[in-house]
Image (spheres, rainbow, N blue to C red):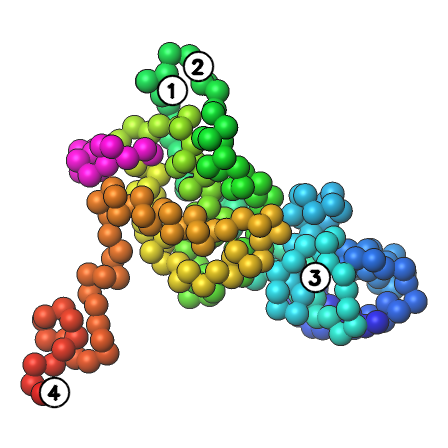
Amino acid sequence: MKLTIQRHQKGKSYEETFDVASLKVTTLLAALYEIKAKMDESLTFDAGCRSGVCGACALRVNGRETLACSYTPHDGDRIEPLNYHPVQRDLKVDKEKPQETLKRVLPTTIQNPKSKIQNPPLSSEDEAKFRVQTDCILCDSCYSACPVLAVNPDFLGPFALTRAWRYHTDPRYIEEVPNDSIQHLTSKIQNPVLLDTVQQNGIWDCTLCGECTAVCPQQIDPKSDIMQLRGESLKAGYSDPTLSTPSFGTPDFGGGFGFDPNAGF
């Protein structure tokens, strides 16, 4: 069995194929360890728990994001690092920039004034609303699979937006509204400031392609969470900015609908 690995060393990028037929490999991560131990000690990759829990070993196989510790290798597999991450060496990437997006969606929390006790316990119904989203292991697979980031590097990305939905649905969080311009739109909406942070380079930029959902090892559905955030945003008075200038591919003479009044029918 031969595995082709995209190498990145000393400023050079190249492919190298390793024949692991004689090695004992059950998972791709085991194969990488065997290659490093017996063929090329310079091979660099990330790993942690080896049990699909920490997300450290996420990479791409044949153009698809997966966890190396959970993937069974096949002859001819091509392994490469995650997309949109600075490559440090071989399959090891820097995840700092993608995970910085999480800071932008953290709610500014204060004690809920309606509660008479500190940190009120959650009901099972409330906890169920964000139980799945809490299982995110920050592997960055959904971020790497997102086609929006290829054209907009400032896009928040799927796991930041699904985390935003997790906080938005948690009744233990309530936010101060910073100004009247938001207050008059969102006086009855929980976490209005959080909703405000996901409007630009956020929920409306998503194409709803579902690639993030397809590659998530935890079966989280960022696409659905983004759709939920869109619905909450509409309730709060926000709107899809792309709908303000619709076009049907013909010249726009000020009517806003792209029709040419002189073109005839």
Q: What residue is drawn where x is 33% and y is 56%?
A: 204
Judge whether 168 appears above or below 258 on screen. Answer: above
Q: Quadrant of the N terminus?
A: bottom right
Badge 1 vs badge 3, beta-carbon distance below 8 Å: no
Q: Report the front residue among 64 and 224.
A: 224
Give percent across and percent down for residue 117.
42, 12
Q: What residue is drawn where x is 65% and y is 58%?
A: 66
Q: Amino acid at mark 2?
A: Gln
> Does label 2 or label 1 sit earlier along the sequence?
1
Q: CA distance from mark 2 to mark 3?
A: 48 Å
Residue that carries the numbered disc 4 in the rendered image = 265
SS type, badge 2? loop
- Answer left or right for 224 relative to 90: left
Residue 12 visible within the image: no
Boundaries of the magenta span = 179-191
SS type, badge 4? loop
Q: Amino acid at mark 1?
A: Gln
Q: CA distance from mark 3 to mark 4?
A: 59 Å
Magenta-span inclusion, residue 8: no
> Does label 2 or label 3 sit earlier along the sequence?
3
Residue that carries the numbered disc 3 in the rendered image = 90
- Residue found at the far left of this picture: 262
SS type, badge 1? loop
Q: Residues within 10 Å of mark 1 (few under 14, many from 20)?
A: some
Q: Report the front residue among 12 and 46.
A: 46
> Does label 1 or label 3 sit earlier along the sequence?
3
Q: What residue is drawn where x is 62% and y is 51%?
A: 217
Residue that carries the numbered disc 1 in the rendered image = 111
